[in-house]
Image (tube, rainbow, N blue to C red):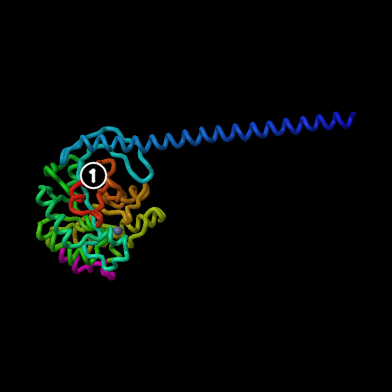
């Protein structure tokens, strides 16, 4: 009898323990679900808030018109907020202007514009009445010190490839298109890149402004703050010394930047910098990571016209 009573008691104890464990697991699952849902929806709200904000402003900011918003908006990890003066200025960016030497290389296809296609694109920009401006002019407009033309546009070229000298520059000259070219100072003269004498030759025409693109083209997000500082300061110093002109802007290699590189760009004397995230609303708030529009090698002329 005593044994049976003990057995019953221990059975009850095990059952109770089991119920408690089940309850504990249940409560944990439900609460973690609620918790993660809350976090996720908050994140989504933040993102969409920034997006909606951008969309609205994009609608309001007419081509060349200036819009001023007073308060800073939330900042995401890698994309700064738009605030202050804002203007709608498409900044197009190109890599290769040349036929793809290796048709198997599909990534290169997307980055390559054939010289014929490039000629047609410049024709479209010219006949649509766009005025290519410099980043300095955009900066002055954002600071309230300059008025933009009716249809401003900025043409940029990354990396300083030799085909800029061979293919792109003669076409830019034909259409008299002001251009900005970003140079990685340590890659000048390397195979497939322009030499200093070619860069100086183009620079002397005044049609192209050379700006910085780091020293060795690293992903800045993977470097220490001191290394980021070196990449930004040294490329600026070398370009300024070689060309005898101020270098006020830079493009982040691979478009990769964060709060550290924005801060270092400011510290080392840049007035602004461009990224690779899509958009054409340039503002005082995103001046150290301005959006651009990548011209894809896959676009036909109709698609090109629709992008800006
Ligand atoms: Zn690059």
Locate residue 258 relative to residue 9 in the image: left or right: left
Residue 60 image-quadrant placement: top left
- Picture coordinates of residue 87 (x, y %)? 20, 40
Q: In the rendered structure, does residue 139 fall within the stretch colored magenta?
A: no
The residue shown at (18%, 53%) is 301
> Is label 1 in a helix, a strand or a loop?
loop
Locate residue 64 relative to residue 236 in the image: left or right: left
Locate residue 235 relative to residue 32 in the image: left or right: left
Q: Is residue 182 above or below residue 5?
A: below
The residue shown at (26%, 32%) is 70
Q: Give the position of the N terminus as an image quadrant.
A: top right
Residue 215 image-quadrant placement: bottom left
Q: In the rendered structure, does residue 192 fall within the stretch colored magenta?
A: yes
- Picture coordinates of residue 127 (x, y %)? 9, 50
Mark 1 surroundings within 10 Å by alpha-carbon count, few (fewer than 14), some (14 through 19), many (20 or more) = many
Residue 84 image-quadrant placement: top left
**Residue marked by disc 1:** 280
Is residue 233 visible in the rendered structure shown here? yes
The residue shown at (27%, 54%) is 250
For the record, the magenta segment spans 188-202
Toward the viewer: 245 or 102? 102
Q: Pick out the residue farthest to the right.
A: 1
Is residue 237 visible in the rendered structure shown here? no
């Amino acid at each position: 009898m005593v044994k049976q009573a003990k057995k019953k008691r221990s059975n009850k104890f095990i059952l109770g323990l089991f119920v408690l464990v089940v309850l504990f697991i249940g409560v944990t699952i439900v609460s973690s679900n609620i918790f993660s849902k809350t976090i996720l929806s908050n994140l989504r709200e933040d993102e969409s808030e920034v997006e909606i904000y951008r969309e609205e402003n994009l609608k309001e900011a007419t081509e060349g018109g200036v819009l001023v918003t007073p308060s800073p908006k939330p900042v995401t990890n890698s994309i700064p907020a738009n605030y202050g003066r804002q203007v709608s200025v498409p900044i197009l960016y190109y890599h290769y202007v040349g036929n793809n030497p290796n048709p198997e290389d599909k990534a290169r296809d997307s980055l390559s514009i054939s010289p014929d296609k490039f000629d047609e694109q410049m024709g479209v920009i010219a006949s649509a009445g766009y005025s290519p401006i410099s980043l300095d002019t955009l900066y002055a407009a954002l600071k309230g010190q300059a008025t933009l033309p009716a249809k401003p546009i900025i043409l940029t070229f990354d990396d300083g490839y030799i085909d800029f000298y061979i293919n792109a520059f003669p076409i830019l000259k034909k259409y008299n298109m002001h251009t900005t070219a970003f140079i990685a100072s340590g890659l000048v003269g390397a195979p497939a890149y322009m030499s200093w004498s070619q860069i100086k030759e183009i620079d002397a025409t005044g049609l192209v402004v050379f700006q910085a693109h780091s020293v060795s083209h690293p992903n800045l997000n993977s470097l220490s703050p001191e290394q980021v500082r070196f990449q930004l300061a040294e490329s600026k110093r070398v370009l300024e010394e070689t060309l005898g002109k101020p270098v006020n802007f830079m493009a982040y290699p691979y478009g990769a930047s964060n709060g550290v590189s924005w801060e270092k760009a400011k510290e080392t004397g840049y007035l602004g910098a461009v990224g690779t995230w899509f958009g054409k609303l340039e503002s005082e708030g995103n001046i150290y990571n301005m959006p651009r529009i990548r011209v894809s090698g896959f676009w036909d002329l109709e698609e090109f016209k629709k992008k800006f």
